[in-house]
Image: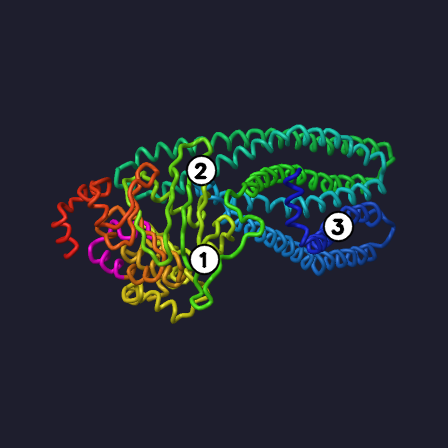
């Protein structure tokens, strides 16, 4: 029940609207209770009475007129506002929950996303949250209305005939036992079904994103079999849930169907013996329907609430995921120069060791590196050398295992995350663009920027001209991950975004790899403008793009093995010299010809 208590924290701000909805609902459910009384009056008092037929018709007319007035003039607005307020309250509560979950998922560590499929995360935020809606409408509103309806019905029945009412209530203990027995297991099966659905959604999300790989390797048949396995897993969980649910309904509904038989038998006996009028018997049977209809709804509510509670458990399990990267108490902002509005940008890696898991191998070992303000440093080495791991530590996507990293002399773990990242701009090999417009994607660099600043950033990134040629210019939707643009165009949009941010520290991770020569030329021009006056870290495989760097750091197996300028490292004839020749740049004379070209 802890999940329910936690869920109520989201409900409490709307308790007034919930109480109002319940009050309106009481009026709605009370109105049908008049019908059996009308039937009893007509059968027992109006039909067999000694009144003249004309007077009987007159009374029947006024009785029906009053009933129609109540069931039209009163019932219509009552029904409307009950439905409206119930939906309004539930929609607002789910809105608040989804907002909190989105804030939470943005703060989760990279480790969490490395270990969980995107589709599973989406399932928690969308499917599980939506499944809790029935708790609001059923558990907080309809459940109470059905209970109140039962109490009102029982009250009227007791007023009419106490022994007959007792006969109608004989099966209630059996009903309570059935609910207690069946619904504990049903909750477990519901959680398993939800987990299987999340797994199915995660698998599908991955395959849709990787459809180009599936097609290029002609894996359609293989993937169909893999999907069938995951889909079958969900089917088995769904069928297990369905079987137990069916057992629950068959048992509980059988119990609730016994009561009318008891009442009919006992009431018939009393009528034959002259102890009960026919009108009372008919009215009593009508009240049985009013009694057991909400009781059956409570059975349905039990199933629905079980499913909702299982979804709550999964939702709060997600909310309870701990953040690996947090701001320390007393975390500060980096000091900026009032004249430039920027930090100095000095970076120091001091005996940095790092591994992704506590029991995993170290991917960085004893890194010591100083980067002066405004300096351009290139990091090179074979794949798996630790280059990307090193730069991911700077914006605190991960924290160092030991040692420390400082910016302008301040340990980055003592800096507020948001402030730290506001001073760092990143251009990656595969930059993420969103499906919104080109304008929106660029403005993500600085949402408060003016139109002129945004256009200037696009021009500096050599992106303005091609954006203007798009069907709707800056308002053109780019499609998911920028699918409507070429690789070079996507890179220039990403660079424009960083231009607009105007950071003091710039990280370029394979920013020009896998591009055609013309795109690379345009991007190199824009990157040269972007890196001017900034502390720049370049990760590159193509050594010809970093010969201008103030310092080149060569990494191998998580360690720095060489450091110096391009010419110095070639003269050492070590790892860098080997890498240079592996890329077929040849002798120093040939190298000069390459650079001259």
Label of residue 422 in the image: 1
State which quarter of the image contains the C terminus. Answer: bottom left
Per the image, the residue denoted by label 3 is 30
| Comparing labels 3 and 2, the label whose residue is closer to the camera | 2
Find residue 187 and report its horizontal and vertical position in percent: 60, 33
Foreground of the two, 173 or 58: 173
State which quarter of the image contains the N terminus. Answer: top right
Decide which of tag 1 and tag 2 comes sooner along the chain.
Answer: 2
Decide which of tag 3 and tag 2 comes sooner along the chain.
Answer: 3
Residue 119 appears in the rendering: no
Colour style of the rendered protein structure:
rainbow
Label of residue 525 in the image: none
Label 3 – label 1 distance at C-alpha: 60 Å
Look at the image and say whether residue 253 sits in the magenta stretch.
no
Look at the image and say whether residue 516 sits in the magenta stretch.
yes
| Comparing labels 3 and 1, the label whose residue is closer to the camera | 1
Find residue 7 and report its horizontal and vertical position in percent: 64, 45
């Amino acid at each position: 029940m802890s999940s329910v208590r936690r869920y109520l924290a989201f409900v409490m701000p709307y308790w007034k609207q919930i109480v109002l909805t319940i009050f309106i609902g009481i009026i709605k459910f009370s109105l049908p209770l008049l019908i059996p009384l009308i039937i009893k009056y007509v059968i027992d008092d109006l039909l067999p009475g000694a009144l003249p037929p004309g007077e009987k018709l007159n009374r029947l007319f006024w009785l029906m007129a009053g009933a129609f007035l109540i069931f039209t003039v009163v019932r219509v607005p009552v029904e409307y506002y009950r439905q409206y307020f119930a939906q309004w309250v539930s929609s607002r509560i789910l809105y608040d929950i989804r907002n909190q979950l989105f804030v939470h998922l943005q703060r989760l560590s990279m480790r969490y996303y490395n270990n969980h499929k995107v589709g599973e995360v989406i399932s928690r935020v969308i499917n599980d949250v939506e499944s809790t809606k029935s708790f609001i409408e059923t558990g907080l509103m309809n459940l109470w209305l059905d209970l109140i309806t039962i109490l009102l019905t029982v009250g009227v029945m007791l007023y009419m005939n106490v022994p007959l009412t007792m006969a109608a209530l004989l099966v209630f203990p059996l009903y309570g036992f059935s609910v207690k027995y069946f619904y504990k297991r049903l909750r477990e099966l519901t959680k398993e079904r939800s987990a299987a659905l999340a797994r199915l959604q995660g698998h599908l999300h991955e395959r849709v994103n990787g459809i180009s790989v599936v097609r290029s390797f002609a894996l359609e048949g293989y993937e169909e079999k893999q999907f069938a396995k995951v889909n079958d897993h969900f089917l088995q969980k769904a069928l297990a849930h369905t079987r137990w649910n069916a057992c629950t309904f068959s048992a509980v509904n059988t119990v609730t169907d016994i009561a009318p038989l008891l009442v009919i038998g006992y009431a018939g006996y009393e009528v034959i013996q002259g102890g009960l009028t026919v009108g009372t018997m008919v009215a009593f049977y009508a009240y049985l329907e009013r009694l057991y209809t909400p009781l059956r709804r409570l059975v349905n509510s039990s199933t629905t609430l079980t499913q909702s509670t299982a979804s709550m458990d999964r939702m709060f399990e997600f909310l309870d995921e701990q953040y690996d990267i947090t701001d320390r108490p007393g975390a500060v902002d980096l000091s900026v120069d009032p004249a430039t509005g920027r930090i100095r940008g000095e970076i120091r890696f001091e005996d940095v060791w790092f591994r992704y898991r506590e029991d995993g191998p170290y991917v960085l070992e004893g890194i010591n590196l100083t980067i002066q303000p405004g300096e351009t440093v290139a990091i090179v080495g074979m794949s798996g050398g630790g280059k990307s791991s090193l730069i991911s530590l700077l914006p605190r996507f991960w924290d160092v295992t030991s040692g420390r990293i400082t910016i302008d002399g301040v340990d980055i773990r003592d800096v507020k995350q948001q402030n730290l990242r506001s001073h760092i701009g990143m251009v990656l090999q595969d930059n993420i663009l969103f499906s919104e417009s080109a304008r929106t994607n660029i403005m993500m660099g600085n949402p408060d920027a003016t139109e002129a600043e945004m256009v200037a950033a696009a021009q500096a990134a050599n992106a303005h001209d091609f954006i203007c040629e798009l069907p709707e210019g800056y308002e053109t939707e780019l499609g998911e991950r920028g699918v409507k643009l070429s690789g070079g165009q996507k890179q220039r949009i990403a660079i424009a975004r960083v231009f607009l941010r105007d950071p003091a520290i710039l990280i370029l991770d394979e920013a020009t790899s896998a591009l055609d020569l013309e795109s690379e030329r345009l991007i190199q021009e824009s990157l040269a403008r972007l890196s001017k006056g900034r502390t720049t870290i370049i990760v590159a495989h193509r050594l010809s793009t970093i010969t201008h760097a103030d310092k080149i750091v060569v990494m191998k197996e998580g360690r720095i093995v060489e450091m110096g300028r391009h010419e110095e490292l070639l003269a050492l004839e070590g790892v860098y010299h080997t890498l240079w020749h592996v890329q077929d740049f040849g002798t120093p004379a040939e190298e000069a010809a390459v650079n001259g070209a």
